[in-house]
Amino acid sequence: MDIDRARLIATARRAALLAVPVVFLTIFFAWPVAAIIHRGIGAEGFRTVVNDHRLREVAWFTVWQATVSTLLTLVVALPGAYVLSRYRFAGRSVVRALVTVPFVLPTVVVGAAFTRVLPHRFDHTVWAILIAHVFFNYAVVVRVVGGLWANLDPRLDEGAAVLGAPRWRSLLEVDLPLLAPAIAAAGAIVFLFTFTSFGVILLLGGPRHSTLEVEIYRQTAQLLDLQVAAALALVQLVAVVTLLLVTTRLQGRLAVQRRLRRREEAAARVRTTGQRLLLLANFTVMAILLGVPLLSLVERSFSVPGGGYGLAWYRSLASTGSSGLFVPPTEAIRNSLVFAATATLIATVIGGLASIAIGGRHTRLWLDVGLMLPLGVSAVTIGFGFLITLNRPPLDLRAKAVLIPIAQALVALPFVVRSVVPVLRSIDDRLREAAAVLGASPSRTWREIDLPLVSRALAVGAGFAFAISLGEFGATVFVARPDTPTLPIAIFRLLGRPGAANYGQAMAMATILMVLTVACVLVFERARIGDLGDF
Amino acid sequence: MLTVEGVAVTFGEHTALDGVDLAVPDGALVAVLGPSGSGKSTLLRAIAGLEPLTRGRVAWDGDDLAGVPPHKRRFGLMFQDYALFPHKDVAGNVAFGLRMQGRRPEEVRARVTEVLALVDLTGFEHRSVTTLSGGEQQRVALARALAPEPRLLMLDEPLGALDRTLRERLTTDLEELLHGIGMTSIYVTHDHAEAREIGDQLVVMRAGKIEQMGSPDDVVAHPANEFVASFVGAR
C-alpha cells in the first residue's frame, strides 16, 4: 500500500480538524496571554511587585494557604475515600454521588453558603478559606484515591494479615505505598485548585486576605494599576504552568497504575463494631462539612422576614426594587442560561474537533498540554488578558456581550477535551481493523465506530461545560458589563451590599444556581460510558 | 486462490515474518500451527492488509493486492478475542459487513437470521454483546465474519479464549461448519490436536518462517525436523 500517501492524507485531515481550534485559541488565548507576558515583563510593574512588601506577602500567602488546604483536605478526605471504596453498605452509591456534588458547585454558591453557616468570629479569617477549600476538594480525593483503592487486590491485605500484620500495619505498609501515586496526584490537583482559588477568597477572606488571583482582580478593578496586575499575572502564569507540568506527570504515572488493577471491586461487608464506628465517624464528617452549609443556604433562602418560611425572596427576584443591581435578578438568570448555552456550544465544537485531531495514537505532547493550559491558567488570567487585548482595534469586543461566553468556553474547554480524549484513546484499535476487514472505508469506520462512542463522551463534556459556564466567576467578573450580570456576578454583588433583602435574594439565587448546576451534571452523567473520562 | 510470496514483516528491529511462501487453493482449509510469537497472527494481518509488508507480495488469483486497502479485499478475519463492537447488539455486529456491501435492509435481515441459525444463535438478535458468555461471543464473531461471504476466511485462534471442554466440543462443530460451507479458509492455532482435526493442509511455523507444510497425516508421519516432530506431537 502507498504508505506515504496515506500518511499525507491523515496529516491533512488532522490539520483541517485543528484549524478552527487553533485559530480560536490563538485569538482568545495565546494573544491575551502573550499580552500579559509582554506587559508583565515591562520593568515598572515587576519592580513594584518585587519591592512591595505587601505584594510579597500576597505571594507567600498564596503558597501557604494552598499547602495547608491540600494537607487538610488529604487528612479529612482520605478516611472518607477508604470507607467509600473498601466497604459495602446500603446506599453507598448515593453517598458517593452526594459527596461529589460540592466539586461541581460554583465558587460563589460555596462562598454564599459559608457566609451563612460559619460563626461570626470566623468572618474574614483564614479558617473560613481553609474550611471552604476542604469542602470543595473533598470529592477530588475521594474520586482519585478511592478509584484506585476500590480496586486494590484484597488478597494483598489478607496476605499481610496471614503474615502477622494487624490492620493498621497493612494500611501503612501495603495500602499507602501502593496508593502513593494516587495520593500525590490528588494532592497536586487540590494544590492547583486552591492555588488559583478566587471566588472563595474574595467572598470569605475579606480585605485582609489576598492571593495572587484576588490581587490581580483588585489591582485591575479597584486600583486600576494594569502594570502591577500584569506582573502578578505573569508570576501566576509561571507558577501554574510549572504546577500543571508536575500534575500531568503524576497523573501519567497514575494511569500506569490504573491499568494494573483488577476488574472486580474489593469492597467488604461491615462486620465489627469498630468498623461501624469508623463509618459513622466519616458520615458525620461528611454531613457536617458537606451537608450543613448547603442545607443552611437553602433554609435561609426560604426564611422570610418576620419569621417563618415562604417564597418572598424568590418572588422579589422579578423586580429591581431594593436590590443593588441595575436589572431585576431574573434577568441575570436569563443571561446566565443564554451565555452558558452559547459557551457550551463553542466549547463542545472546539473541544470536539481538537479531541478528534489529537485523540489518535500518535499524539504530540505539546498539543495535549496546549489544550490543557486554559485549565491551569486561571480564569482570572483569562479575564484579565481579555481586558487588555480585546478592547481596541483590530478586535474591539469590549462592549460586546459575546466576550462572556467566549471566556466561559475557554474555561470549560479542557473539561470537554478531558471527557472525550480518554474515550477516543480507549477504543480498541482492533475494532477499527475489524470494521475495515468487513469492508468499511476509513471514513465509514470513523462514522460507525468512533463517532457513536465519542458522541456520548461529548455529551458528558457538554454537560460539564454547561455547569462550569453557569457558575463561572473569575473570568466573567472581568468582562461582564454592569447591565448584563450573570447569576454568580449578581450573587457576588448582592453579598457585597448590606441589608437583609440583598442577602435573602443572594441566598435564593445561590439556591437556584446550585439546583441548575447539579441537575445538569446529573443529566449528562447518564451518558457516561463506564468510568472513562478523567473527571 | 491466495498466493503469498516471500512475505516479510518487520517491526523495527524485530522480524515477525521472514520470507513466507504459501498457496491456498479455492475451497481449501489450511491450518497454521505454531507456538506463540511464531508470526501466525502477523501472517493473517499481512494477508488482510492490516500490516504493511516489508518485502514480498500477497496476491489473489494472480492479482497483486499491494494497493488494495483492507476494506476492499473482501477477506474475512475473525480476531483472537473477537473485537465485537460493544455499542452494537448481536444483529448489529453480524449485519455490519452486509451493510458495508450496500445490501438492502430486508436482505440484510434475512442473511443475519440465516447466519445466526448457522452458528446456533437463533433469537439472539437483540442481545447486547457484552452480556454474552465467551462461547456465545465466539459464535457471534464467527457469524460476523461469515455473513458477508468473504472470498477468504481467516480465523485467528478462534477457540483460544475458551476453556478446554468447550473448546473440544466446538472444534468438532467448527470443523463440520467450515467444511459444510466449503469456504476457502486459513485457521490459526497453537493447539496441534485442533489443527490436525480441522485442517486439510497443515502449515507449521516457527520464528516467522514456515518449517513444514503438507497433509496433517503426512506431517505427523514424516516431520521435517525435531521441532516439528515435538510440536505436532508425533513423538
Image (tube, rainbow, N blue to C red):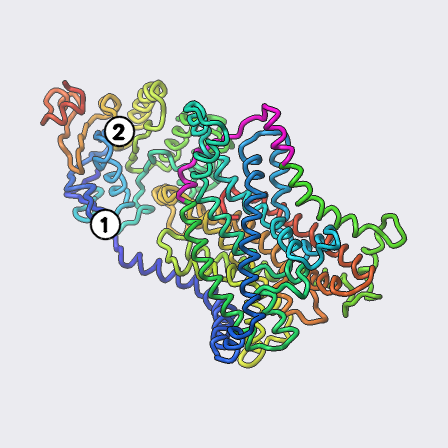
Residue at 27% across / 55% down in the picture? A3
Indicate the quadrant where residue B43 lies: top left
Q: Viewer-proximal residue, A389 or A495?
A: A495
Residue indicated by mark 2: B189
Amino acid at dot 2: Thr
Using a 10 Å C-alpha cutoff, classify the residue at mark 1 as few (fewer than 14 neighbours), some (14 to 19) or many (20 or more).
some
Residue at 46% across / 47% down in the picture? A184
**Residue A55: x %, y % from top left:** 56, 70
Question: Looking at the rendering, in which quadrant would you find the N terminus of chain B?
Answer: top left
What chain is tagged by disc 2? B
- Residue A52 can be seen in this image: yes
Point out the stretch of residues depicted in magenta. A256-281
Whether residue B4 is in magenta: the answer is no
Using a 10 Å C-alpha cutoff, classify the residue at mark 2 as few (fewer than 14 neighbours), some (14 to 19) or many (20 or more).
many
Residue at 62% across / 67% down in the picture? A404
Q: Is residue A87 above or below residue A524?
A: above
**Residue A441: x %, y % from top left:** 37, 49
Question: Looking at the rendering, in which quadrant would you find the C terminus of chain B?
Answer: top left
Q: Viewer-proximal residue, A36 or A115?
A: A115
Whether residue A275 is in magenta: the answer is yes
Residue indicated by mark 1: B66
Amino acid at dot 1: Ala
Q: CA distance from mark 1 to mark 2?
A: 26 Å
Q: Viewer-proximal residue, A310 or B54?
A: A310
- Looking at the rendered image, the disc whose residue lies closer to the viewer, 1 or 2, is 2
What chain is tagged by disc 1? B
**Residue B37: x %, y % from top left:** 23, 35
